[in-house]
Structures are given as C-alpha cells and as structure tokens.
C-alpha cells in the first residue's frame, strides 16, 4: 500500500468503480500523488485532479520514473532554495546546514541534511539537537526524499514526528500560458525591490506575524522582487521572486490573494510578472514549494507547467 514517502511520485491506482453481476468493476488512473490521508488519496492526472476514497482502492503502486533527478540535482536545488530563504542565524555541521529565524517558518528554522555531516549519523543528529537547544528552539530537520531517507530512518528510531509532505516543483521559463485567465480589468502588477507596508501586512496575516528575523529572510537576497497587485488602487495580491543558484533559478514564494479577490486570475498575473522578471535576469527555470495537501495550488501550478522535482518532510523532535 502507499506511504507518505510516495507523495510527489507518479503512481498507478486500480480502483473499484462499480459492481456488475456480483463482480467488481475496475478503472485505472495514472498521475502524480499529491495528497495521501487516512480516507482519501489525490492524483494530479492529465485530465485534472482525481480524489479517490481509500476504500475504493484495490491496488496502488509507484511507477518507476522515466527520469529521476540525480542526487546532485536535488542538492543544487535545495541550496538554491536556501539562498532564496536565508535564515539570519546559521551554522554548519560538515556539509549540513543549521538555520534559525526566531521560529518564523519551518524552512528557516530547520537543519538541511545534505552532504556529509563529518561524523556518524547518530552523532550528527545529537549535534543538531544540541544546536537548536542552544537557540532555545525545538529541533527540526528537513529531509529531501529520497536523498535523505537514511536520516529519516534514524529519526524514526528516535520517535521524531513529521509534518505533511511539501512538494518542490519546477518549470522551465517562460511558464506555460502564464496569462491564462486574465485578471479583472483595472488590475496591475508592480515589482519593486522592497516590500511596502501593505505587502508586509498581507504576508504577516498569512504567516502569523513578522518578527525582525522574518524581514531578514524576505529581503537578504541580492536579486529579489516583491509583486504588488492592485485593483482600483487597493492591494489585493502579493508575491515574491528571487534569483539564486548561480543565476539559474527563479524562486517563487508568498503568492497570496486576498479572499475577496480570489478566482479572478490574480495569482496567475503575479506569477507571470515574476516569471518575466526572472527570465530577464537570466534565470532558466522556476521553482516553488507547496504543501502536498494544497490541491488547489498544485492544480494551478500544474497548468503553468510545474512538475514535482522532489518532496521533503519536516521532521520534528519529540518533546
């Protein structure tokens, strides 16, 4: 049966769709597993999102990928993502990265175990726990899959918990039909090098406040732009773009549309503006990180050409 480690991978599902003359009728579906819960699984198929009750699943298995990213490619993208979301307090454990930002977001407050920690794995995890204790924070470790599977196995033996999987998705630039679903008339997107007070207010509402460390995470990147989408002079959507990874990667984050302005094409307008800027700055590919259960966002990104490069779990030390 499927496990959380299968999220982000292509799978084939044989499901029961009816009964005829006392015998079950089956239908097969192929797609990327974007959500797995106790009751349902969700696939991103070529025809769109498909939500299947677990009770209807007769058989499911992962499909061997035609082209899996190499370990080096995962490491390079994870380092580009770290550059795009820089924690103000940092340390090294061999090649592993240790990061803290007053608890603001898991990405900026977790160890990234890529490369050699320069000591046996159990001793490396001990050192991570000590470092975060010195910061006065709970220990978190982000484990890119399947690259960091050995780390995950060590954490399992220690009783570490796990947050829902996050998909790291990529797409070539320019994005596929980024202007589809044009935003309402009178809407414009402005890109600036520093966020406005209104932009920060929207971001704070999404992320539960903005401590000083958060402002460092948002702005301490050489190439960064903050998207402001206005409708009749009112800020209705935001986004953030960075160019990192030796200029190759456009990182997209904090794509947020106010509730009263949703379903009007504003997210696509923000993404299009940031993609144009990234391409003009020399980036050839875009990446973003999206929680696997956010099926609406996953569907939007799929329409723009994004596919899952790899996934990661945020592991949480036991109290």
Image: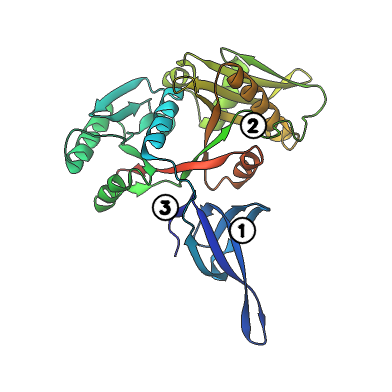
Nearer the observer, 282 or 216? 282
Q: Position of residue 52 (x, y in %)?
A: 59, 62
- The x and y percentages for residue 291 are 51, 42
SS of the residue at dot 1? strand
Q: Are marks 1 and 3 in contact (CB under 8 Å)?
A: no
Q: Which residue is mark 1?
A: 51
The total of numbered circles placed on residues is 3
Q: Residue at x 67, y 32 (%)?
A: 267
> x and y percent of residue 133 in the render?
24, 32
From this viewpoint, which residue is outermost toward the front?
A: 66
Q: What label sits on residue 5 in the rendered view?
A: 3
In three-dimensional space, the C-alpha distance between marks 2 and 1, rounded to whole angstroms, equals 26 Å
Q: Is residue 288 left or right of residue 267?
A: left
> In the visual, does 228 lie left or right of 59?
right
Q: Picture coordinates of residue 214 (x, y %)? A: 45, 22
Give the residue at x 71% y 30%. Answer: 266
Q: Is residue 246 above or below residue 19?
A: above
């Amino acid at each position: 049966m499927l496990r959380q480690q299968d999220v982000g991978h292509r799978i084939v599902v044989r499901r029961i769709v009816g009964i005829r003359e006392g015998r079950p009728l089956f239908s097969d579906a192929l797609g990327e597993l974007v959500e797995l819960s106790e009751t349902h699984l969700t696939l991103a198929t070529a025809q769109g999102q498909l939500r299947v009750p677990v009770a209807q699943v007769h058989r499911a298995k992962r499909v061997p990928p035609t082209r899996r990213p190499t370990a080096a490619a995962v490491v390079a993208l994870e380092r580009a993502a770290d550059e795009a979301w820089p924690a103000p307090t940092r340390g090294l454990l061999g090649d592993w990265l240790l990061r803290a930002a007053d608890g603001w977001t898991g990405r900026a407050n977790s160890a990234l175990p890529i490369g050699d920690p320069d000591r046996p794995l159990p001793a490396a995890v001990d050192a991570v726990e000590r470092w975060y204790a010195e910061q006065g924070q709970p220990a978190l470790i982000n484990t890119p899959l399947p690259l960091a599977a050995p780390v995950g196995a060590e954490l399992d033996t220690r009783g570490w918990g796990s947050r829902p999987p996050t998909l790291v998705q990529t797409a070539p630039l320019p994005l596929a039909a980024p202007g589809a679903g044009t935003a309402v008339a009178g809407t414009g997107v402005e890109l600036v090098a520093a966020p406005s007070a209104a932009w920060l207010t929207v971001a704070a509402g999404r992320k539960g406040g903005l401590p000083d460390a958060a402002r460092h995470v948002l702005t301490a990147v050489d190439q960064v732009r903050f998207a402001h989408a206005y409708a009749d002079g009112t800020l209705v959507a935001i986004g953030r773009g960075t160019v990192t990874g030796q200029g190759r990667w456009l990182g997209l984050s904090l794509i947020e549309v106010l509730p009263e302005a949703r379903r009007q094409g504003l997210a696509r307008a923000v993404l299009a503006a940031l993609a144009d800027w990234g391409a003009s700055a020399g980036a050839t590919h875009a990446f973003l990180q999206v929680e696997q259960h956010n099926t609406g966002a996953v569907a939007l990104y799929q329409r723009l050409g994004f596919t899952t490069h790899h996934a990661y779990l945020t592991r949480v030390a036991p109290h």
